[in-house]
Amino acid sequence: MKPNRTLNADADTAVARHMVTNRLLVSLSPSDRALLEPHLEAVTLYQGEILFDPGDEVTRTYFPGGSTMVSLIVLMHSGRGAEAATIGREGAVGGIVSSGHKPAFTRAEVQIPGPALRIETTRLEEAKVRSSTLRDLFSRYADALLAQIIQSVACNALHSLEARCCRWLLTTQDRVNSSEIPLTQEALAEMLGVQRTTITGVARALRARGLIRYARGQIIVMDRTRLQEASCECYAAVNQHFNRVLPEVRPQGIITATDL
């Protein structure tokens, strides 16, 4: 049977289209991109989809594109969980630096649906063996991701819920590249590890000050500058470290409420 060249061409086009929406992949040199591109597959990730759970073997690495965002969630025996980090178009999920046996420690859950590229982790490892610059890039990205997790630990212990909420909204806005964040207050409460009624009070206070507004199923950032002022230092600290460690991974502009 002859291969379906139309289907293959469509798949190649989809990969090329999604590749430009992931900041990590866009930063690659043509030679490094060529090591990965034949093995990348364009997929759609759905809200609530679990990419892996604690103890699962991580066999695929995902590169979110567009406004897609994945949360790394630490689960407790009680069934409750709290978000340790978020990953969007600036990074990758799963099997970034390790080789061989790769059991997951956290749950990776899709919070905001959208496009992504995925690759078998073994293929990614093979590419890193062939390219020292590719290996170095993913090692530096892992350092930036670890910094986000470490900063979250300090933030949760030392800062007010309102400051933490502002930080989370800013970080998520960076991920989705829009003032409209398609998440409910219930989901926000879950990510921050607090009760729904608690986050409702914080959201109401932020709305009263004109920083945000919300409608069913979404939170809208109205004044990003003042939201940054209300946030703790952690948002800036994580961004500054990311930019120092990965200067070639270009930032992308934020759409403000006045642009809507």
Image (cartoon, rainbow, N blue to C red):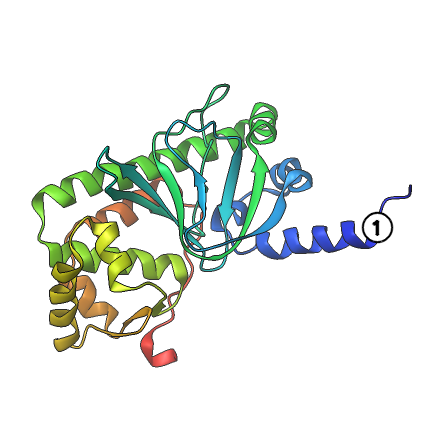
**Residue visible at 17% across and 54% down?**
164
Q: Is residue 129 left or right of residue 226?
A: right
Identity, as a three-letter code, of the amino acid under mark 1: Arg
In the picture, which quadrant includes the N terminus?
top right
**Residue visible at 41% across and 55% down?**
251
Residue 30, placed above or below residue 164? above
Q: Nearer the viewer, residue 228 or 184?
A: 184
Which residue, given by chain and number where applicable, does mark 1 sit on?
5
Provide the secondary structure element on which disc 1 rests.
Answer: helix
Q: Nearer the viewer, residue 254 or 81?
A: 81
Residue 213, placed above or below residue 48? below
In the picture, which quadrant includes the C terminus?
bottom left
- Would residue 236 be visible to someone looking at this image? no
Q: Nearer the viewer, residue 253 or 232?
A: 232
User: 10 Å neighbourhood of mark 1: few (<14), some, or many (≥20)?
Assistant: few
Q: Residue furthest front?
A: 78
